[in-house]
Image (cartoon, rainbow, N blue to C red):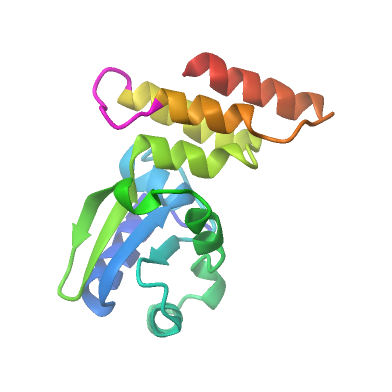
Amino acid sequence: MTLDRGRIDAILDAAADALEGDWLLVGGAAAATWFLPGRVTEDVALVSLRGAQDDRLALLTLAERLGLSPEAFNSTADFFVHRIPGWTAEMEPLRLGRGARIHRPTVTLFILLKVGRLSEVDLDDCLALLSFARGTSPTLDRDRVVAALEALPPTTDAALLDRRRALRDAL
């Protein structure tokens, strides 16, 4: 299933009312709701700040209630988010509902979440965000992102090396 901005917004509105606590929206859904209105994605990556199993089950129950498959919510995003030191300080408010607060990442966190894989779509998202935020966002910690790029393991994949260079140049 492909989710566009309108569908993602409806899912987030439902999540903000049905879920409890604080959540972080990342990935393509964050891009679509924030800086790339034409962006589509196959899932919504919502990470519970509490990290409780009950929160994950509530998210899957919400998917069922909305007529979505459980795969509509990316259940592995928390693994990648939790690997970034200080990630809880890298969030900005996005939605406030009856039971939950949904946040989006800062520019820095969004890019840090993308650099490890840095697929073509990841690079496109990062470049679009940098263009969108240029001159207006105090949340880009360029040095931290450059350090993350430099700490990546070496690769013989020429296309990946090109994408890494393109991101570094855009910073």
Relative height, residue 68 to residue 147 (above, below): below
Nearest the viewer among 44 and 112 is: 112
- Residue 139 is a magenta residue: yes
Task: Determine if residue 42 is in view.
Answer: yes
Q: Residue at x 63, y 37 (%)?
A: 118
- Residue 58 is a magenta residue: no
Q: Residue at x 17, y 68 (%)?
A: 97
Task: Determine if residue 38 is in view.
Answer: no
Relative height, residue 70 to residue 159 (above, below): below
Q: Residue at x 84, y 29 (%)?
A: 156
Q: Residue at x 51, y 52 (%)?
A: 41
Provide the major secondary structure of the magenta segment. loop
In the picture, residue 66 is in which quadrant? bottom left
Relative height, residue 107 to residue 56 (above, below): above
Nearest the viewer among 163 and 83 is: 83
Q: Which residues are magenta?
A: 134-141
